[in-house]
């Protein structure tokens, strides 16, 4: 039996798609609030520029490139799913997952370096924001990668191909969040 | 993704995003504040728009989806603006900020050390 959300339509779109847009809307408030608070504190504390100078721009740039590329694979998976090619869609989703793993590995290396050099979540408010924002984003990357694996497993069998678009929308949003985190944490020093 | 747009060149869009990334990294290297603002944050807005429209296809979704996103963004900014005085100002009509209360941790460790020293002296 197919889940009801894939066969029912509401507000002019499948309910699964509607649910994903609602998730994105709620995430806008979560990440928007976090980034807004960061910007306000950053503007009112000149010392934060000094703390931000310790973040590694090369690592941030590499991770941005990794996420943009994974977004490309996600939209190519969507394109393949629309053509009914489940195997190709699953393959592109696996590439997207590889991007997620690469992102997390790079982040792990970066955090290991920073923590070992005394820059921890309790060092000061800047680093508290840094680890909280990047940590919540990282949790979203992990969640997205897990869901993508489940979707890819079904897509490879030609099942539930509409889910490829849904996880893609979520993944592009995770990419957009990083697009804003990147200049805030790595560029503006 | 709509049927009338089957040949969207996603690789080309990705290449544009990578070029924008390169500009956003190179611009602030010149250390001109307005250029940093434009290249780092202005380009972030452009990149986000490109991803939202070309990859997420938000422009192909029903209009209310865009309205929903914008509404969430506007309300979030309203709430942030409401709390901005707490961050930017150090005092108001009926309040003032005690800097030492939130900038520094209470000297618990020093107090403990003192207590230990006193205790050692007593022995």
Image: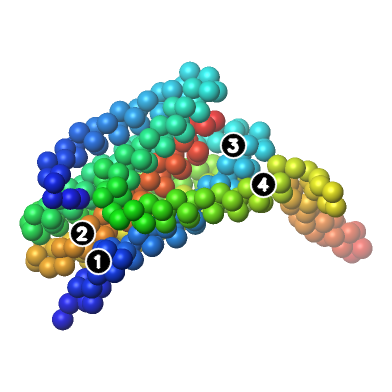
Label 1 resides on the chain identified as A
The residue lying toward the viewer, choosing from B14 and B117, is B14
Residue occupying the point 38% across, 62% down:
A22
Dot 1 crowding, Cα within 10 Å, few <14, some 14–19, many 20+:
some
Q: Quadrant of residue B21?
A: top left
The residue lying toward the viewer, choosing from B83 and A15, is A15
The residue lying toward the viewer, choosing from A121 and A4, is A4
Label 3 resides on the chain identified as A
Dot 2 crowding, Cα within 10 Å, few <14, some 14–19, many 20+:
many
The secondary structure type at the circle numbered 2 is: helix
Give the labeled residue for mark 4.
B84
The secondary structure type at the circle numbered 4 is: helix
- The disc, 1 or 3, on the residue closer to the chain's N-terminal end is 1
Vertical side of A127 occupied by A186: above or below: above
Disc assigned to residue A164: 2
The verdict on a common chain for dots 1 and 4 is no
The verdict on a common chain for dots 3 and 2 is yes
Q: Residue furthest bottom?
A: A1
**CB under 8 Å between callouts 1 and 4?**
no
Residue A135 percent coordinates (x, y)? 46, 54
The CA distance from mark 2 to mark 4 is 40 Å
Dot 4 crowding, Cα within 10 Å, few <14, some 14–19, many 20+:
some
The CA distance from mark 3 to mark 2 is 40 Å
Q: Quadrant of residue B62?
A: bottom left
Give the labeled residue for mark 1.
A14
Vertical side of B12 occupied by B1: above or below: below
């Amino acid at each position: 039996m197919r889940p009801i959300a894939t066969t029912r339509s509401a507000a002019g779109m499948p309910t699964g798609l509607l649910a994903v847009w609602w998730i994105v809307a709620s995430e806008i408030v979560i990440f928007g609030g976090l980034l807004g608070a960061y910007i306000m504190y950053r503007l009112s504390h000149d010392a934060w520029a000094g703390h931000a100078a310790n973040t590694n721009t090369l690592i941030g740039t590499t991770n941005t490139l990794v996420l943009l590329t994974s977004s490309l694979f996600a939209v190519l998976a969507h394109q393949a799913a629309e053509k009914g090619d489940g195997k190709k869609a699953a393959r592109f989703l696996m590439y997207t997952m590889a991007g997620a793993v690469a992102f997390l590995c790079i982040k792990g290396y970066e955090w290991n370096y920073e923590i070992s050099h005394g820059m921890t979540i309790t060092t000061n408010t800047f680093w508290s924001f840094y680890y909280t924002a990047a940590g919540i984003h990282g949790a979203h990357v992990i969640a997205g990668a897990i869901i993508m694996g489940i979707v890819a497993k079904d897509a490879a069998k030609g099942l539930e191909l509409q889910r490829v678009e849904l996880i893609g929308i979520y993944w592009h949003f995770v990419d957009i969040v990083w697009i804003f985190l990147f200049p805030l944490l790595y560029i503006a020093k | 993704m709509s049927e009338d747009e089957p040949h969207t060149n996603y690789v080309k869009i990705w290449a544009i995003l990578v070029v924008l990334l390169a500009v956003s990294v190179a611009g602030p290297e010149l250390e001109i504040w307005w250029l940093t603002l434009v290249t780092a944050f202005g380009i972030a807005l452009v990149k986000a728009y490109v991803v939202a429209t070309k990859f997420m296809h938000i422009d192909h979704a029903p209009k209310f989806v865009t309205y929903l996103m914008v509404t969430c963004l506007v309300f979030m900014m309203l709430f942030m603006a409401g709390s901005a005085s707490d961050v930017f100002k150090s005092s108001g009509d009926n309040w003032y900020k005690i800097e030492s209360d939130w900038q520094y941790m209470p000297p618990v460790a020093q107090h403990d050390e003192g207590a230990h020293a006193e205790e050692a002296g007593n022995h």
